[in-house]
Image (cartoon, rainbow, N blue to C red):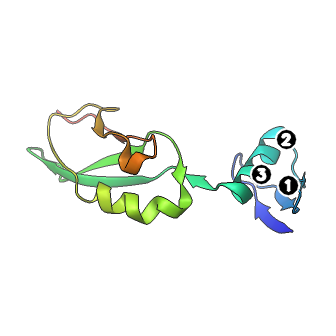
Amino acid sequence: MTNLICIVCPKGCHLKVDENLNVTGNSCKRGEVYGKAEVTNPTRTITSTVILKNSTYTRLPVKTSCPVPKAMIFDIMKEINKIEVTAPINSGEVLLENVLNTGSNIVSCKTVK
């Protein structure tokens, strides 16, 4: 039995997931989906910053375009830390495609002129 706190919505339901992937304690269907996924293949969206040149700002906020396997977070962060960009840059601009073959891109979260 695995005990989790659901992070899908602000309620924070206390979930229990058994060995057959039966989820209890959820107050909505999204909690059931989250509980099963968290036990079988946990994923996270990574947010970070990269070096920004040619701007009054020195760092640019970035994130993964979709959740990535939790076990790969540190390896993906090593790749993010290698990125340096030069302004101008647009919000949503892809800075690194398909990071470590996860299907997720590293994208800018801010427009800097």
Which residue is at the front of the view, 18 or 88?
Answer: 18
Residue that badge 1 annotates: 21
Answer with mark 1 or mark 3, whichever residue precedes in sequence: 1
Q: Residues within 10 Å of mark 2 (few under 14, many from 20)?
A: few
Q: Quadrant of the C terminus?
A: top left
Image position, residue 41 (x, y; %): 65, 54
Looking at the rendered structure, the kind of residue marked 1 is: Leu
Looking at the rendered structure, the kind of residue marked 2 is: Cys
Which of discs 1 and 2 lies nearer the camera? The answer is 1
Looking at the rendered structure, the kind of residue marked 3 is: Lys
Q: Residue at x 42, y 52 (%)?
A: 47
Answer with mark 3 or mark 2, whichever residue precedes in sequence: 2
Image position, residue 103 (x, y; %): 45, 40
Q: Residues within 10 Å of mark 3 (few under 14, many from 20)?
A: some
Give the number of the disc on residue 28.
Answer: 2
**C-alpha span from label 1 to label 3:** 6 Å
Q: Residue at x 14, y 38 (%)?
A: 87
Q: Quadrant of the N terminus?
A: bottom right
Which residue is at the front of the view, 19 or 26?
Answer: 19
Which of discs 3 and 2 lies nearer the camera? The answer is 3
Q: Residue at x 27, y 60 (%)?
A: 81
Q: Residues within 10 Å of mark 1 (few under 14, many from 20)?
A: some
Residue that badge 3 annotates: 36
Give the number of the disc on residue 59.
Answer: none
User: Is disc 2 placed on a helix, strand or loop?
Assistant: loop
Q: Residue at x 76, y 55 (%)?
A: 12
